[in-house]
Amino acid sequence: MPVEKKSVSRELSVKQVAALKKMTGPVNLSGANTEDLLRELLVRLGEDPERDGLIKTPERMAKALQYLTKGNHEDPASVLQGALFDVNYDEMVIVKDIEMFSLCEHHVLPFYGKVHVAYIPNGKVVGLSKIPRLVDIFSRRLQIQERLTVQIAETLQEAIQPQGVGVVIEARHMCVMMRGVEKQHSSAVTSHMLGSFRLSDKTRKEFLALIRNGKSESF
Ligand SMILES: [Zn+2]
């Protein structure tokens, strides 16, 4: 009896593998170059990759995707390392309205919006231009908004050990807007607070008031 069972399940799995092969083509695609894969994708979407407008699309698409994920090959800690300065300043430092463009990892569709970053130094500050740079490195990856928020806050926390860090991201997701699942004008807000931003109501409120202040239009 057990022997019979075993052979049945093996037969099924062979069938499943065959069905899978039929659906997905050759299982090992590692020998194909990116442009070939993208050309094949166009065919499967019902397109003719030989028509005028599409001839160079696989090449352009490959370049765009590489650019939009280049943060995978960049090290945020080393970017900050070269721009740390000792100071006697213990008021809140805020960089707000940093433009952010990223790709959601569930649909590989864009989400975009604004990032607000604040910290209270504890003897060290980081060059102001490095904060947008940090946002770029983490957003040029396949992301989810929640993780992006946490990564920005924790990298800053580790680099300069401030009294606290606050990060707020407001973003719109094309996977929601284009597929018409939700209201088109809805946006998602995420935040991550560390140290004094987490512990002190007053600090957190000051930060939130400052990023709301002067907000004229939506992004
Ligand atoms: Zn998505």
Image: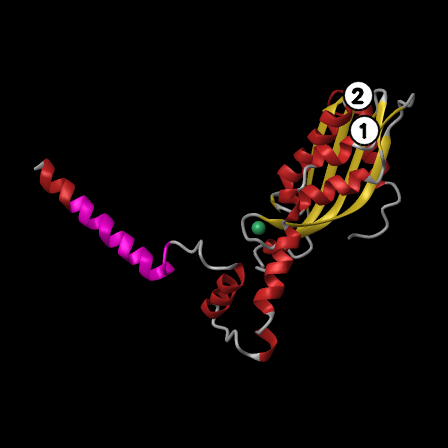
Identify the image quadrant of residue 28.
bottom left
Q: Amino acid type of disc 1?
A: Tyr
Q: Mark 2 points at which residue?
A: 163
Rendered position, 46 above or below 179: below
Q: Amino acid type of disc 2?
A: Gln
| Residue drawn 60% across the image and 55% down it | 109
Disc 1 residue: CB within 8 Å of ligand 1: no
- Extreme-bottom residue of the structure: 52
Identify the image quadrant of residue 35.
bottom right
Residue 24 % position (x, y):
38, 59
Mark 2 near mark 1, Cβ–Cβ under 8 Å? yes
| Residue drawn 62% across the image and 43% down it | 72
Q: Mark 1 points at which residue?
A: 119
Rendered position, 156 above or below 22: above
- Extreme-left residue of the structure: 1
Residue 140 % position (x, y):
66, 47
